[in-house]
Image (cartoon, helix red, strand yellow):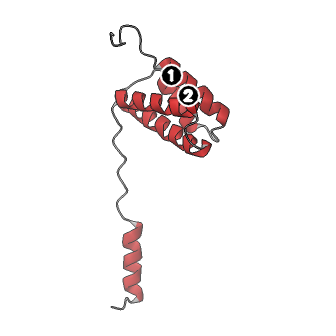
Amino acid sequence: MTLRPLGLAWLAAGLLIAPAARAATPIPYPEAVANSRTTARMVLDKVAAESCLRGRLNRSMIKLSDSCAANGERSELCRLADKVAATTPITPDVMEGASRRILELTEPTAAQAPTP
């Protein structure tokens, strides 16, 4: 099969006007908070290379920020997620400080803690 120049133009035009990818649906807020806690612990425990942890923290903050927006949350945790997600570059100090603050802000209260 040989494409003529006009055929190539139509093919290129079709590729350029392909439908835009749909944005992923935000994860539920409690799941986003739990994910941010897990990531914060990983950062503080240095369980992987710094670059890997930086990426995980960034993705976690974006997911949390999206979830906050979708649920109308305006907490300090949500503001932190927005700030960290927009920070470039995310330095080790930012990673550590944000992780400590995430754990502080999401610490279960005595009323939420499971009874022994």
Q: Is residue 29 above or below residue 19?
A: above
Q: Which image quadrant for residue 51?
A: top right
Q: Look at the numbered discs 1 and 2 and tell me whether their residues touch, using CB distance below 8 Å.
A: yes
At x 40%, y 31%, the residue is 32
Residue on which the image places disc 2:
99
At x 49%, y 18%, the residue is 105
Mark 1 crowdedness (10 Å alpha carbons): few <14, some 14-19, many ≥20:
some
* Image x and y of residue 46, in percent: 58, 35
* Tag 2: amino acid: Ser
Looking at the picture, tell me which residue is in the foreground, 29 or 107: 107
At x 39%, y 85%, the residue is 6
Give the CA distance from mark 1 to mark 2.
Answer: 6 Å
Q: Is residue 40 above or below residue 14?
A: above
Looking at the picture, tell me which residue is in the foreground, 43 or 77: 43
Secondary element type, mark 2: helix
Q: Is residue 111 left or right of residue 75?
A: left
Q: Which mark is residue 103?
A: 1
Q: Is residue 2 above or below residue 110?
A: below
Q: Which mark is residue 66?
A: none
At x 65%, y 35%, the residue is 92
* Image x and y of residue 90, in percent: 62, 38
